[in-house]
Amino acid sequence: MTAVTYLDVWNLEVFFKGGSDSAELAAHLKVTKELIENFETKVHNWTPLNKTEDKVYLKELLSDFELAGKKLRQAAAFVGCLQAQNTEDKKAYALEATVTGLSAVFQSALSAFDNLLSSINDEVWAQVLEDEYLKELTFSLTERRERAKEKLSIEEESLISALGVDGYHSWGQLYDLIVSKIKVPVEENGEVKQLSVGQAANRFSSSNREVRKDVFKSWEKSWNEQADYLSKTLNHLSGFRLNVYKKRGWKDVLKEPLSINRMKKETLETMWAVISENKQPLVEYLNRKAKLLGLEKLSWFDLDAPYGKTESKVSYQEGAEFIEQNFALFGEKMAAFAKKAFENQWIEAEDRPGKAPGGFCTGFPESEESRIFMTYSGTPSNVSTLAHELGHGFHSYAMKGVHYLNRGYAMNVAETASTFAEMIVADAAVKNAKDEEEKLALLDDKIQRTVALLMNIHARFLFETRFYEERTRGPVSVDTLNNLMEEAQKEAYCEALDEYHPLFWASKLHFFITSVPFYNFPYTFGYLFSLGIYAQALEEGTGYEEKYISLLRDTASMSVEDLAAKHLQVDLVQKDFWEKAVKICIDDIDEFLQLTENK
Ligand SMILES: [Zn+2]
């Protein structure tokens, strides 16, 4: 038995002493600013000669880029941690503004840099990449160059960015503003309470159906009252996006999201095809759940209803040891990584007021360390969250020594290591459940996640693709939006529900995010991609760890198709891999159906 007792508060002092008053941080920010300005100046002074000699200056620029980038990231991570650990820390907000300002300057220098890369002709470019140092960066540099080429001139793109501040992005902000004013009235103990949308959404996981039903009625009504404003917002936001695409000559609305996620359209189509072919078990699960709840069919507002009971509490120490033990079944390095994180206080888990909600893992590239944030209150799902965030940390750890330019992995692979780690622990928890009730609750929790990723996200994707199609022909009315959404939901849920949520286009923030287009399919991709790897790991045992680490190291320096071919020996355009991944989800459902057969 380990004699070490783990502390549940993190250590940030090793980075900068003194929190938001830190003199060390102030000095660091000053240096970061100088480095960014230096990079900016050098970029502006560069005129590529279109000769192989260009590589000399390019290498110098890249080394400056890495230096400035790491410093900025180190500061941003620290400031993010300060804000999360104490939401009242006003100085941390001022520091955030400083970091955001530096980041904007850095980004615009990078756009100029990318544009210069695209001005080098193909022949010279090929010669430049033969350089020993640059060879390793071929994918990242070529990607930057290609993306710049596909855009308009630097002047036009700058104008679009500038207009986007009060155009495109402000529509996204207007959405947030409208939503912040929405109240959802519900009656509780004879008294009408005005809930915020966040509070109302939480009521959908109530075990009392009347509560869920009442909230839903009021929920749809409240969104409907704002529907005119929200549809106008969505129409202008998407109109702006489509106009930019048109000017750039981009015909397919999926071009940008696919490129950001470094994947082919065929891969996406295969993934959805396999999901669609395997919906039957999910439908059976929904039907069974309806029966267990005494219903004919489930309604939209029943989807998050809990089933079964878990009252067991797991202390932080027990949770940590459970994670270490189960990680060890998959590999030494993962277990050792978790142990190091617990021992060296990389995790802020204390349950106390004044912390931000949610959880995250953030990397400090200069120190090659991560920090994890969450609030641990001892529920089984807290243990899963902890494992999830440790998975993110392990991803960074696996990338140790990888060039800074090769570390920017996209959203669709960002959740690979976290889902993998979470699966290990969630499966172990189901196996170790103390009775059937607990086992069912844990299984149901896992399956709900599958339903969300394979059905709910599918509906979002179907809706969004059809909506953008419709929008190219002109503004889309509230009625059409509602119809498109309800149709998409019926299709994605195979008509298994009794009532749907037509105003979901309004209530789901993700359709209004301007920084990332199509904020949906990468979730499903990431989940199934990770499960496919998990399936291979289960087959191959602990020897799999080295392979797994080399896959993680490559997550930001190749397309997902190449990544899968190189490390998993599979073709993502073919169905096999996806079928194996979906099978894992179906196994859970089968177990659930068996256990509830006679209930
Ligand atoms: Zn995550």
Image (cartoon, rainbow, N blue to C red):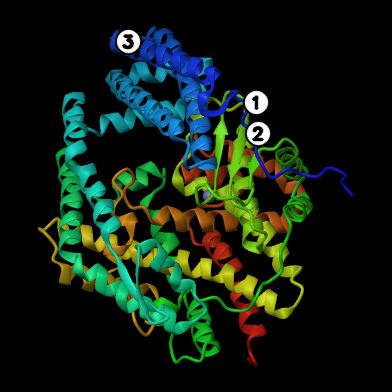
Q: Which residue is mark 1?
A: 14
Q: Residue at x 55, y 17 (%)?
A: 24
Q: Residue at x 89, y 49 (%)?
A: 1
Proximity of marks 2 and 1: CB atoms separated by less than 8 Å: yes
Q: Which residue is mark 2?
A: 11
Give the mark, 2 or 3, whose residue is nearer the N terminus: 2
Proximity of marks 1 and 3: CB atoms separated by less than 8 Å: no
Nearer to me, 87 or 524: 87
Q: Is residue 333 above or below residue 121?
A: below
Confirm whether residue 562 shows in the render: yes
The image position of residue 532, as x and y in percent, is: 58, 57
Looking at mark 1, is its residue's CB closer than 8 Å to ligand 1?
no
Numbered mark located on residue 41 in the image:
3
Considering the numbered disc 2 on the image, is that residue within a helix, a strand or a loop? loop
**Amino acid type, mark 2:** Asn
Nearer to me, 387 or 311: 311
Task: For marks 2 and 3, give the CA distance.
Answer: 37 Å
Mark 3, residues whose alpha carbon is within 10 Å: few (<14), some, or many (≥20)?
A: few
Numbered mark located on residue 146 in the image:
none
Considering the numbered disc 3 on the image, is that residue within a helix, a strand or a loop? helix
Nearer to me, 171 or 69: 171
Confirm whether residue 250 shows in the render: no
Q: Residue at x 35, y 16 (%)?
A: 124
Q: Nearer the viewer, mark 2 or mark 3?
A: 2
Considering the numbered disc 1 on the image, is that residue within a helix, a strand or a loop? loop
Nearer to me, 383 or 54: 383
**Amino acid type, mark 1:** Val
Mark 1, residues whose alpha carbon is within 10 Å: few (<14), some, or many (≥20)?
A: few
Give the mark, 1 or 3, whose residue is nearer the N terminus: 1
Looking at mark 3, is its residue's CB closer than 8 Å to ligand 1?
no
Q: Name the residue furthest left.
A: 474
Task: For marks 1 and 3, give the CA distance.
Answer: 33 Å
